[in-house]
Image (cartoon, coloured by chain):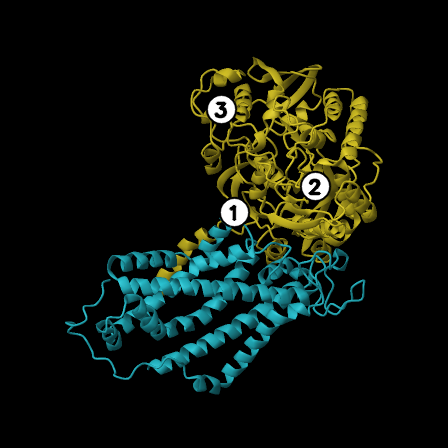
Chain colours: A cyan, B yellow
Amino acid sequence: MSRPERPVDPMFVPPLVKTPRRSFNLQRLKRRPSMRSAVIALAVVIAAGLLLPLLAPQDPYDLNSFSVMDNRLPPGERSMDGLTFWLGTDSQGRDMVSAILFGLRVSLLVGLTATAIALTIGVTVGLFAVNFGGKIDALLMRLVDFILGFPSILVALVLLAVMGRGVDKVVFAIVAVQWAIYARIMRAAALVERRKEYVEAAQNLGYSNGRIMFRHLLPNSIGAVLVVATIQVAHAITLEATLSFLGVGVPVTRPSLGLLVANGFEFLLSGEYWISVFPGLALVVLIFSLNLVGDRMRRAFEARRA
Amino acid sequence: MNARLLGTLGLAILPAIVPVSAGAEALRIALASEPTAADPHYHNVSPNNALGKYIFDALAATNADQKAVPGLASSWQAVDDTTWVFKLRSGVKFTNGDPFDVNDVIFTFCRVMNNPQSVAGSFTPYVTAFAKVETPDNLTLKITTKTPDPLIPEKLAEIAILSDSIVPHGEITFDLEKKCGVTGEWPTLAQLNSGEATIGTGPFKLVKYVKGAGVELVRNDGYWGEKPAWDKVSLLPVPNAGPRLAGLLAGDYDLIESPSARDANNLKKDPKFSITTKPSNRVIFLQFDIERDKSPFVETADGKNPFKDERVRRAVSLAIDRNVIVKRIMDDAAAPASQFVPETMFGAQPKPEPLVYDPKKAKELLAEAGYPNGFKLTLHATNDRYINDGQVAQAIAQFLNRVGIQTEVDAMTSSIFFSRRSKREFSLSQGGWGSSFGGASNFLTQFVATNNKNLGTGRSNYGGWSDPEFDAVISQANATIDEKKRSELLQQAARMALKSLPDIPIHFESTIWAFRKGLSYEGRMDQYTLAAAVKPAR
């Protein structure tokens, strides 16, 4: 894929004179009621994940703060020292409310960090591919194809099997499988922008490649990438939960939502539903609201482009 | 696409997607822990040994209560302290038609010694104990041991006999220097896993072994013993107890291993299912890294390995409330352990000094040893090998935290755990051991005696503990034919081990099997699930 030869392209369509708008139509977004509830739900979940661990009745990562003597108590039961377990306890005696709040925090942390890193890498790679074109472009894009050719869960599983457990390693594995998505979208968007007149004008003015890349191409093509990123945050969280559920994600003494679901799994048939069901619900609400927001943003974005 | 074509296609696809047809003679078993190889000499662990008993026979067999009974040898006799004569069964054929005789036995002994892929030497010490093996005739085997060994028949019950027809060979003799007369390459793990060299005399034939996906077997119609009731058997690994039970309830499996004790109690009330509970010979224990001055998963203020100090090991034992683990994690399908074999076994102490729970004393001992603020530790465990193993490890971590040892748990799948443990990568590991023969001597010889390749002792002594006085007692016990005296020596050895505590016993598992109505299984003390012993109840 080489760079288009701008001056003599017979298919060249003169772009609109108007400079493209950079912001979304926020008014449009706000007017949708389902959007409002999704944003509120998301805000509540994020706030719970970020703030409430401070207020959680116990620290589920501190093995001293709970006792196996309180294990598998149904919701509403009291512990030996008088603490009420509103959502019951797991097989080790952890308060499920605290475990879910801490688990949400891990999920958000992993989702946001992984997405931020993957986004940065992907956008940079995409811009470089467009700017340098030719062999570098071809090489980078074949690498992207190669990575996207594998199911992401498979690649992440292999990476974690080699590296071992831990939140940092989960983030690394997610970044490794997700940057390619951003690289491809960034390249596509930047390729379109690159043909536009204002870029040509900037080149004629003698601006450096770097300046054109980061000052002109980046802000004008990042919108599509950011929309994808919201949905990818949800994907990253799902991936983390899946990996933990499969037992290769976080350590067993620091459970995330996926691991909590996995832990409760074997007690489901004995009627001890709360160990799996409540963390599962928390995960569903988080993913659903993230996806809803992402979807609405995509629609708003497309409406602007149309 | 027209309807008839669709129907034909459907018929053609059906056998492919339903590997075992739903006839009365197919048996589908969900395993809690899958065999890591179809090679019976690869690793001496229960799931592998159990699979070996489907495909292969040994000279002796063990019944459900671990007594040695005739197998491929129809009778045996100890001529003197070191000489045993085995009469082999005549008319037995391998599944490839090769008739069974002494050469197959000797070839098998040699293969055990020439199996570089095996884990932790697997069965080699049984063979290195032989001074010579002679063959007065085609069906008589005379084994002379280097030292008196009362357990020869029980040990030979563990060695699965392969056919010598799987490799090119000349005249076969028990001469390890000269490769016993084998001229070709020794059979590899891959050849046995693929079924190419998996030629046995057992009740079943291997159809397919796929790691992670299960084992398929068909009945060996030429089997010399009582033929099993099942044409086909599938062994499916389902490490998680929930899905295992769900599969049984849904009719996907006919029999499942170790449903959780709580579920088993519910199943008892269901007329469509039955359960069997059997106390096992398996102890769950902790093993310390003692030999090294620095241990990889301990962080102390002074940088030293705290487990070198007997007081620290004692403190770890005192910190653990075994009764709570049995009650809250095992749902009473276990018994707290104060020694390494259950009281009913040969050589066990009838009334061992109980290993009590005393966190205050534990803290005192830690302070005395120079760790008033404890230290940081990672406890390594399996999460798919023993009953509730991951849960038990976390509960132990809780108890250790209470006395100030900040413990993290790393629970992993058993194949990774075993290979890392054999490379001695851990500081404190939680293992399990079923004493399949020899009563109390088994654990003590494997795990507590000093690691010595020539004597075949301490093969699983991954902590490097070494106590010459203990070694003297246990080796004397293992060479004593007189049962009363041997039992006394074993009890003495156990008391010594429990005083210095290189390993800490936690509990003995009870094994539960659940199956659909219309079947019966009496269970086994060694926890094996053997399809040949599963009977359709008529």
Residue at numbered disc 1:
B212
Q: Real-space Cα distance between discs 3 and 1? A: 29 Å
Q: Earlier in the sequence, mark 2 or mark 3?
A: 3
Estimate the x, y position of residue B33 in percent, counting from the top left. 60, 45
Estimate the x, y position of residue B46 in percent, counting from the top left. 62, 38
Residue at numbered disc 3:
B164
Work out whether residue A22 or residue A140 is closer to the camera in this orientation and state it: A22
Above/below status of B300 relative to A111: above
Mark 1 vs mark 2: give the one in front: 2
Dot 1: within a 10 Å radius of its alpha carbon, few (fewer than 14), some, or many (20 or more) residues? few
Q: Is residue B341 visible?
A: no
Estimate the x, y position of residue B348 in percent, counting from the top left. 79, 32
Residue at numbered disc 2:
B286
Q: Earlier in the sequence, mark 1 or mark 2?
A: 1
Q: Amino acid at mark 1?
A: Gly
Q: Amino acid at mark 3?
A: Asp
Question: Which residue sits furthest top?
Answer: B136
Kindly state the secondary structure of the residue where label 2 is placed: strand
Dot 2: within a 10 Å radius of its alpha carbon, few (fewer than 14), some, or many (20 or more) residues? many
Q: Chain of mark 1?
A: B
Q: Amino acid at mark 2?
A: Leu
